[in-house]
Amino acid sequence: VPVEKATTRPGLLGTKPPKPPAPTKPTPECAFQLLHPTTLKPKRSVAGHTGDVLCACHVPEYDWIVTSGNDRQLIFWEPGFAQIKRWNIDTAIGSLCWAPIQSYGRKTSENLGGMLFAADRCTEKIHVWNIKEQMVVRQYEGPICRASRMKCSATERVRQDPTCQCEQCRMHWELEGHGSNSPAQVMTWIPQMEVLASAALDRTIRLWDMIQHGKLSHEFRGHTKGVTCLEWVPSVRSLLSAGFDHTLSLWDPQAGCKFADLRGHGSSIAGAKVVPDSPYEVVSVDYSGICKLWDVRRLECVQTFLANDAGAEAGQEPQGVHPRSMVFLGRDRLVVSGRKMVLFERDLPDPKVTSDTVLTSMAVNERKSDIFTPTRGDAGPGGAEASGSVRVWSALSGQIKGSFPNVVASNVTALAVDAGSRRLAVGSEKGEMVILNCSSGHTLKVLTPHTVPKRGGRDEKSV
């Protein structure tokens, strides 16, 4: 977010004018910023790459961060962002993925730590490094050892000699990828199956079985344009994909087929993530700034909101963020990043500040900016907000102001405020009608209940 320049006050009579602020050191062009997770303000910049930083991933087993850049380097960082190791490779890496593997191979008791997957940005190759322990990274010279270096006469590139059987070459190998001129755009790990999923612009999604040393197990075809988003949804054991065809697709990786499409976006989808600690919710954002919250159990959209910066322009008109990525900072905090970064916060599921039941009716007191909503019988009989109570909310702050308990004997089904905004009419499912004072909640009058004939011959009271 652009920051306005600070202005200094002129010095008072008989005092020295304030000193101008000391010039700050310019941030290196290829450094990346660390932001505070609460305020999103920059904490520090980290320099290390000599080219643009392309991607990063977290290694939770060792608490590391791995970054890749246009300088054809992989850099491993400690939690304090001190460099652990710098690997020089022969190509730029466009996507990174870490896979913690505990039962890799036939010997299930053998602990192999994890695997680092790196997809070339310009070729179809997917590099695989088996990192058993931290010292492997610190002692490793690079993806190609000096003894196995060969130079291809056609491409003039240094490649690995397949006949070399040293320890350095055994810990690194390559997957065949998606074919020529189709580099993998995104990768994700499926821990239940120990399978790597990758997607490319050739409209395909491939699953690589790492138990069988990277054998291709399935290839999904169904998107009409390139795929740029992949996310594993463990609650429904499904793989979520999205891309340039404006559609989110759900796949069954074990059966190897697609079982649902989620439609609603009007432009290419820039990101899709599972909501943390809410396994059945997925959020997606497209290039136009439209964000959608999906319920993967019912396969429908439950909320739509716009990512924009309302006060960005001088004319106080909304300016598009042009999203390119998104990340969750917890269950109720979402950051959408593009030209700007926008933070969204969701109200906590607390009955004291939100309504957790279905609202059958609502009334507004325009004079006092109050909102009246009914409560159901979930608070328990005899409670402060048992069945037949009315909550009072502030339309200005969104917080609850109080409640009118036990207004009627059954659930409230109708609410209305009179023209003078002084009296509140309350109706119940049994036909009761009560007039309350909007300010105090005192009962002013009890009307004759409604009765309607029922088909069985009895009279049923209703409103």
Image (tube, rainbow, N blue to C red):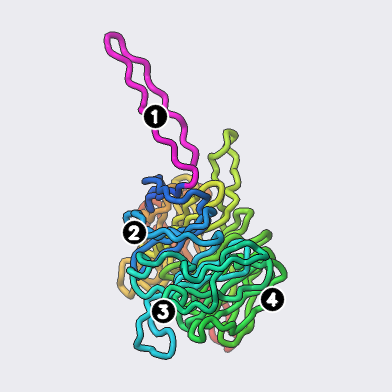
| Position in image of residue 460 (x %, y %) | 52, 80
Q: CA distance from mark 1 to mark 3?
A: 49 Å
Residue 222's label in the rendered image is 4
Task: Give the quadrant of residue 384.
Answer: bottom left
Q: Nearer the viewer, mark 4 or mark 3?
A: 3
Return the residue nearer the eye: 154 or 11: 154
| Position in image of residue 334 (x %, y %) | 47, 58
| Position in image of residue 7 (x %, y %) | 42, 24
> Taking 155 as reference, is 195 above or below it?
below
| Position in image of residue 276 (x %, y %) | 43, 68
Element on which disc 3 rests: loop
Q: Of label 1 and label 2, which has the lower sequence position?
A: 1
- Image point (42%, 58%), residue name: 86
Q: Amino acid at mark 4?
A: Gly
- Image point (49%, 38%), residue name: 2
Query: Would residue 321 be visible to someone looking at this image?
Result: yes
Q: Which residue is mark 1?
A: 23
Q: Of label 2 and label 3, which has the lower sequence position?
A: 2
Return the residue nearer the eye: 315 or 416: 315
Return the residue nearer the eye: 299 or 91: 91
Q: Amino acid at mark 2?
A: Glu
Would residue 52 be counted in the magenta stretch? Answer: no
Judge the density around disc 4: few (<14), some (14-19), many (≥20) Cα neighbours within 10 Å: few
User: What is the residue that sits farthest to the right in this orientation?
Assistant: 224
Q: Which residue is mark 2?
A: 78
